[in-house]
Amino acid sequence: MELGSSIFLGTAGWSLARDQWPAFPPAGTHLQRYAARLPAVEINTSFYRPHRPASYVRWAESVPDRFRFCVKMPKEITHERRLIGCEEALDRFLHECGHLGHKLGCLLVQLPPSLAFDAANAAAFIETLRERYAGPVAIEPRHPSWFAAEALLQQSGIARVAADPAPFPGAAEPGGWAGLRYFRLHGSPRIYYSSYTDDWLETLRQRFTEQPAGTPIWCIFDNTASGAATANVLALQQRLG
């Protein structure tokens, strides 16, 4: 598989670790400097609080045309309402992040570890989402019962995240809809802190080449607490050529 425009490589947020500043242009906002080197980013702050449409417009206008954003769905929908009765909150979120225009590359739905798969509730939520948004979606369930959702995710065009560390056996492998692969790397063994070794990154690169030809791949480093994500994403980018 030829890798290049099919891979969206980035970190959770665009803060740049100070020791990696020389790898980025010296001028511009953090986002502008970040986007000059990397093709994608995951917006996590949308999970905690809404952003004004004007903020999304400003972010979209400050990055190259090829750049793509993934936006994390608010916790009001996933953790508080637990996917039930969230039409109004979903409309508000999609209106806000829709101001990214064509630079909105994906939505991320991260579920709480306590949320088990309920076929009726999951199907109703996905139907509600798909009535409003037809673009790429990745879901990161953290309860093992969600393996039972594979058929529903495939039918709905929703990818299941490959997570590290895996919250349950099998979660390290991507699943759901095969038209998108999404890798979220939180740092292991110490989540959000640990850096990945060169050997681990090389194995990851090889995993990418094993995906079906032309499949879009998102790979987001979320080990940002100690700044390891910046070094890891740059090292992987170099390996990918």
Image (cartoon, grey):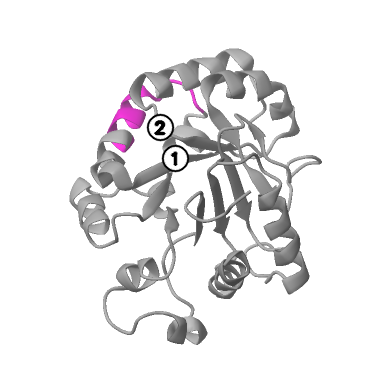
Tell me the quarter of the image containing the C terminus.
bottom right
* Residue lying at the far left of the rendered structure: 54
Asked if marks 2 and 1 touch (Cβ < 8 Å), the reply is yes
Vertical arrangement, residue 238 with respect to residue 59, above or below: below
Task: Tell whether position 91 is magenta.
Answer: yes
97 vs 172, left or right, is left
Residue 151 horizontal/vertical position (percent): 66, 19
The secondary element bearing badge 2 is classed as loop
Taking the image as shown, residue 75 lies to the left or right of residue 148, namely left
- Count of labels in the image: 2
Q: Position of residue 199 (x, y in %)?
A: 77, 69
Q: Nearer the viewer, residue 188 or 230?
A: 230
Q: Main secondary structure of the magenta part?
A: helix
Disc number placed over residue 180 in the picture, else none? none
Q: What number is the disc on residue 135?
A: 2
According to the picture, the residue beneath numbered tag 1 turns out to be 107
Quadrant position of residue 155: top right
> Does any portion of residue 90 appear in the rendered image?
yes
Whether residue 74 is visible to the viewer of this picture, yes or no, is no
Residue in the picture at 49% in, 21% down: 126
**Label 2 is placed on what type of residue?**
Gly
User: On the image, which quarter does residue 22 sit in?
Assistant: bottom left
Q: Earlier in the sequence, mark 2 or mark 1?
A: 1
